[in-house]
Amino acid sequence: MAQTDEFGEELADFVRRVAELKTARSVPADDLPTVLDAAIFELDHVADQLWPRYERLTARPPGGTSSTAQEHQLLKAVFQLLPLPVALLDRETVVRRLNQAASAFTGVRAGYATGRPLTGFLAHADRSAFRGQVAAVARGEGDRSLTVHLQQRPSVPVRATLTALRPSGEPRTTVLVVLQPAGHRLPAVESSARPLPNLAEATRHAALMDLLDAMTTALLTVPAAEALDRAARVLHGRFADWVVADTASPTLTRTTVLAPSGKEAGLLAEQDPATCPLVVAAARGGSTALQVRPPDPDAFGHDTTGAPVLVRADVTSLLSVPLTAPDGTVRGVLTLFRSGARLAFSMAEARAMDTMSRHIALAMDARG
């Protein structure tokens, strides 16, 4: 499979070069010998390289032998059942495969991780170094090892060992990553023949219903001018570690910042919300934005020290919600952060927050 992919790439490159040669028909007559030499070189390449490789590929039985297929199945089973957390990445750190132990260790399902960069699950400070080491290993510069931190457990140092690998089903060199917590035991891979009731999910649903009730009660008992601040205080702590409220009429104005501590809140109190791309996008009529492990550290601008807010606050997930009145006018924007090891915002929580945002906008618009 890998040889077929390589042949396809070389053939595609040849077609592109031929297209370039065709555009050279209009060159001056004095330059035609150079173009002719290039055309002859391409023909030699087809005769000496591409055609013999094509013959070898077509001579192979399609799909390989049954024993080869059985061997591939065995290797996949070994990969999945290996007790060590193991991931297979491409040179851009995109996850190609994640075994069961790695899924349990990172807290990320294999189906969700596949196709996403592994750097997205690491602390911001470790991403550049990890990306560079993976690229070096993929280039054939030797095995590497470095210490990183998972966003979900930033206090636990993780040793990542990298080695180059060329599986038969992959078109290019991939990187095998083994994750091991430094000085800690590996978490056991849980397995069960029967599915158990998801008590954690039921608990989160009950907490969400309690939050909706608290929000409704708060909005029915405060004046319109205090509705946004009161809503922010309902959400703070029980639903989000950080709550930032901005009004949007006529211009964006920061009104409330609730953080894990008063000192941290001061870092954003003086920030101009117009410098926060997420806030600006929501104020222009955008929909609720849910981000888990935000890929852009500058998405919420910078604090008074010049540091990216999402990095400084160790944000692992966020919700940015426009407060839209029935006439379509955006009255304000609420931005919620969760940080550290706290569970990321779920789709159910985002939908509930979207409902609450409409109620908050109505309360801000109330007359009387």
Image: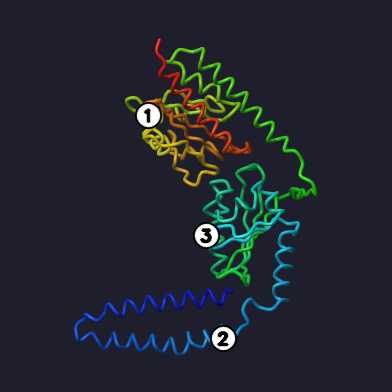
Question: Which residue in the structure is indicated by mark 3?
Answer: 92
Identify which residue is drawn at 56% across, 52% down. 119
* Up/down of 363 relative to 278, above or below: above
Task: Please say if the residues under marks 1 and 2 sit with CB atoms less than 8 Å apart.
Answer: no
Within 10 Å of disc 2 (Cα), the crowding (few <14, some 14-19, many 20+) is few
Which labelled disc corresponds to residue 251? Answer: none
Amino acid type at image mark 1: Gly
Question: Which residue in the structure is indicated by mark 2?
Answer: 56
Judging depth in this view, the residue of 186 and 1 nearest the camera is 1
Q: Quadrant of residue 27?
A: bottom left
Q: Marks 3 and 1, how far apart in space?
A: 41 Å
Identify which residue is drawn at 73% across, 57% down. 84
Q: Which quarter of the image is occupied by the C terminus?
A: top left
Amino acid type at image mark 3: Glu
Amino acid type at image mark 2: Arg
Identify which residue is drawn at 53% across, 74% down. 5
Judging depth in this view, the residue of 71 and 263 nearest the camera is 71
Horizontal relation, residue 107 to residue 29: left or right: right
Q: Which quarter of the image is occupied by the N terminus?
A: bottom right
> Where in the figure is residue 59, as x and y percent of width and height?
59, 86
* Up/down of 153 relative to 19, above or below: above
> Where in the figure is residue 164, as x and y percent of width and height?
61, 67
**In terms of secondary structure, where does tag 2 sit?**
helix
Number of the front mark, 1 or 2: 1
First of labels 3, 2 by sequence position: 2
Question: Which residue in the structure is indicated by mark 1?
Answer: 328
